Amino acid sequence: MSSFLDRAVVGVQALATVRRIGLLHPKAAASALQGAKRWGPTLAAGYAAGVARRGDEAAIHDDDGPMTFREVDEQSSALANVLMARGIGPDSPVAVLVRNSRWFVLTVAALDKVGATLLYMNTGFAGPQLAEVLRREGAELLIHDAEFAGAVAQHAPTAERIVADAPVAGLDDVPSLLAGASTEHPPKPERQGRQVILTSGTTGTPKGASRSKESLGAGLVAATAIFQRVPFRVGDVHAVPAPMFHSLGNAALLAGATMSHTLVLARRFDPEHLLAQIAEHRVRVVTAVPVMLQRILSLPQDVTERYDTSSLEVVFCSGSALPGSLATAWMDRFGDNLYNMYGSTEVAAATVATPDDLRAAPGTAGRPLAGVDVRLYDDDDRPVTEPGAIGRIFVGSALRFEGYTGGETKASIDGLLSSGDLGSFDEDGRLFVGGRDDDMIVSGGENLFPREVEDLLADLDGVREVAVFGVDDDQYGQRLAAFVVLDDGADLDEAAIRDHVKANLAGYKVPRSVTFLDELPRNTTGKVLKRELRERHPDA
């Protein structure tokens, strides 16, 4: 079939899906179109449509209570007007360091209305990482939760900032700024903004993966391919414990706004609290990373049985490898409601496994989405087509990123972008992801590079040499393991090694285990033989 016919078929399927899930509500569609003309296909446009569809119904339930669609639209306009008065305008880089809450939603929608460039900051960053990213990305303003005020003051004291959620002495805060501010929609910005979601580079330093709002428009069309595979509906009650500064949670937020979902949020994930939210709000959809499912399953069964989860019909999972045993255990406990998506910040959504796929082939990443091209190539860039054969995964779709903010990009073949993973297809066309094609690992939805931790520990007084790599972990998918050789007379133990990493890097980069050796095994050229270290690892 020609590429023209391919696109036509995808377009017809997308229109049918839009009709089926109820997106063509006349008043909401008109409001969405008006919002898109003003702000592009953004969160702001989604909530403008939500006012027409569900104006005074709850758009958000969070730690601060309920908030209606009308309130989200009006208060985000008020914040946009305040920001414009402070000189924030089209293309102004604004960093957002806010946990899952109404304050995250209001901030993002307001910046959409201003046309600013959104820089999503990881709430797990250590102070030095935070300061480096703010400097590198040239942020003109940082909007952050009150809990981060001390770290920002210490590591980025010159940053212009506003507190998102509560008063902090000497700083402006969003709740106070909203009081008395105009709730009229601000003027249409001269240019639509961009969004930058942070990932990691080859050294482990966080990189910014950039997308324009125009590309998000193509993405919303392409996202209907997910709706074809996963039964989202307009008006769903949708819990999003996945962090919204990351691709998965951010996509759930945008899709939820587009379909006028009632979002159920919490600043921090707690497995029993999520079950309580599901029961209280009759949640139909949950978007989570696999480790969250693992933590729920780790609760005693008598605890999980306290909560009525019968409303739950869709558990949308991504962010790291989903072990087949975890998928089976989840569905055995909570029903066949699990959908596993494979993708990355750079290539976006590539495949989705339905409950039927996961029952038939536990551990699969599923089949390619409509309009998405997923292929395997060998090390010589030749196609790998035989079922079961391993190749490097490359993906082509309208959702792919435009490159890192530093100018780099990912490898590309035949117009498809490398995901950085190795994988294979079975005879039924299901993808299985076998691991990274470099040293990067994914732990609880976070991309980690061992080299960054190696370099940090190598500079610690008393450490002679160190090797760090990823090992399998039942809870997080993968975790880091460190092998350390100490100087003679050095007095360091496992706690000291782990504490040093925690003080300088994000908490998810702390090694799960530390093993002390007299020397590291090396080959004749001096390279560390990590294969031998893996054999010595306690879990080998």
Image (spheres, helix red, strand yellow):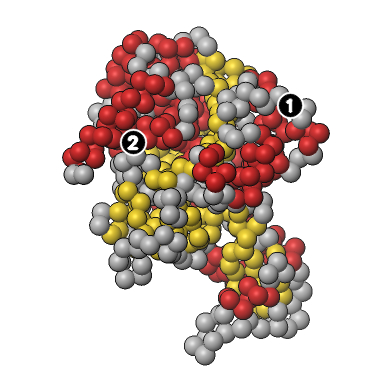
The secondary element bearing badge 1 is classed as loop
Please name the amino acid that badge 1 sits on. Tyr
Please name the amino acid that badge 2 sits on. Ala
Of the 4 image quadrants, the one containing the N terminus is top left
Above or below residue 55? Residue 190 is below
Please give the count of numbered marks on the rendered protein: 2
The answer to whether any part of residue 369 appears in the image is yes
Of the 4 image quadrants, the one containing the C terminus is bottom right
Counting residues from the N terminus, which is met first, the one under dot 2 or under dot 1?
Answer: 2
Q: Which of the numbered marks, if any, corresponds to residue 222?
A: 2
Residue 405 location in percent, x, y? Answer: 35, 51
Above or below residue 207? Residue 483 is below
Q: Residue 251: which quarter of the image?
A: top left
Question: Mark 2 Cα within 10 Å, few/some/many (few <14, many 20+)?
Answer: many
Q: Are marks 2 and 1 in contact (CB under 8 Å)?
A: no
The answer to whether any part of residue 181 appears in the image is no
Above or below residue 222? Residue 350 is below
| Left or right relative to 495: residue 505 | left
Q: Residue 359: which quarter of the image?
A: top right
Residue pictured at 57% horizontal, 28% vertical = 313
Residue under circle 1?
307
Given residues 467 and 172, the one toward you in this image is 467
Residue 82 location in percent, x, y? Answer: 42, 23
Residue pictured at 63% horizontal, 81% vertical = 520
Q: Which of the numbered marks, if any, corresponds to residue 16?
A: none
Residue 471 location in percent, x, y? Answer: 62, 63
Residue 305 location in percent, x, y? Answer: 76, 30
